[in-house]
Image: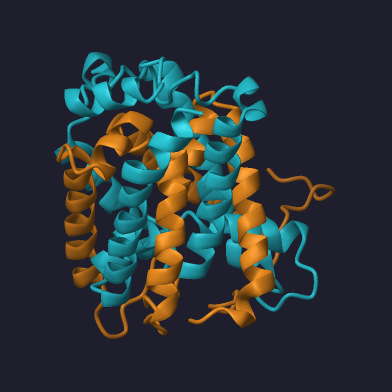
Amino acid sequence: MTSVLEPRSEPAPRIPRPAHAAPGTGAVIAQLGVWMLLGTIFGLALVKSEAASWFRIQEMLRFAGPKLFLVLGSAVVTAGVCFAAMRRPGAKALLGMTIDLPPKTGLHRYWLGGIAFGAGWGLVGVCPGPMWALVGGGAPVILVAIFAAILGTRTYAALRHRLPH
Amino acid sequence: MYELLAQPWPWWVGGPILGLVAAALLYVGNKSLGVSSSFRHVCAAVAPGRNAFLRYDWRSVGGWNLAFAAGLLLGGAIAVHVLGVPMPDIDPGVRQTLAAQGVRDFSGLLPGDVFSIESLLSVRGLTIVVLGGFLIGFGSAYAGGCTSGHGITGLAALEWRSALAVVAFLVGGAFTAFVILPVVLSR
């Protein structure tokens, strides 16, 4: 028998959230957890498939072994098949937004920026994904390379309007 | 199970997992995989100045990407400290060439003699770590992506501009490996 002094608490009426309202704090943390989990899987696969190995990259850039070309190639084919299945008119992501990969524009930035990036890749011997993974793997010097990369990004931002795109 | 995971993963395991992560990002939240944008988000958070390229709400635009980068760090830590990373069985010719150019330490993920804190005091270490890192940041920002953004996402989305960028990555990388790195390593 319920006491009169302790009335059964009524749940507060739920206000339906509009489809695209800013998510609450709990939802934001949960989403960040999902991105972090996917990053963890990606980092594990980068290191364990040797895409984060300086020695393997040196072999790749000298076209002396197939392994990393096969890693990259099979990643592209897998992602490509999934993308093709997902990119249908009106397709929605789980979080509600429309799935779209915005088309790229311009021309010169791809080969000019690409060669500059390639030169850095050849020197450091690892690309940005593996750089973060290597810091986790216990190579503190790579933090210095990441700091230099952030400086490089800032320099590009400052020179951007003078560079051909 | 542990034994299996601790082995180096063959390409047909590692590659498809990388591709599936790119697909999962798009499927869950319409995110396109790319790691170099994490550098841009850090810039936007720390030193945007009055620069249009860096003036955006980095929390809402880049929060997911920075969480992903934190995951990369964690994944790298698990791979190295829990599973272990043996020296890969690279092409013996390349190994011989690198040894002749002055690389001494053939173990782990990076040659310890080239990537030590003390090495930062030498021309060799400075060029490789600082100039190399700078070019990685500058070039990926200029090209609008790196080996993940153009190499995986762009190619999988059948973007010819990404294919151009990937060819340029390999041209710049091969030129550096064949011509510039031998000079730098022997310093």
Residue B11, quarter of picture: top left
Q: Is residue B79 left or right of residue A141?
A: left
User: Colour in which chain A is shown?
Assistant: orange
Question: Which residue lies most toward the right here?
Answer: A5
In percent of width and height, residue B21 lies at 33, 51
Residue A96 % position (x, y): 44, 73
> Which colour assignment does the render follow?
by chain
Residue B59 visible somewhere in the drawing: no
Identify the image quadrant of residue A39: top left
Q: Residue at x 40, y 25 (%)?
A: B109
Residue at the spot 77% in from the left edge and 53% down from the top edge: A7
Percent position (x, y) of residue B67?
Answer: 56, 49
Q: Residue at x 40, y 61 (%)?
A: A115
Above or below: residue B168 compared with residue A17 = above
The answer to which of A65 and A10 lies nearer the viewer is A65
Q: Does residue A144 appear left or right of residue A133 in this picture?
A: right
Nearer-the-camera pick, B96 or A110:
B96
The quarter of the picture where the N terminus of chain B appears is top left
Please tell me which residue lies in front, A98 or B148.
Answer: B148
Q: How many numbered callouts?
A: 0
Q: Colour of chain B?
A: cyan
Looking at the picture, does residue B76 appear above or below residue A66? Answer: above
- Indicate the position of residue B49 as horizontal and vertical percent values: 80, 69
Is A11 above or below relative to A47? below
Task: Determine if residue B179 is in view.
Answer: yes
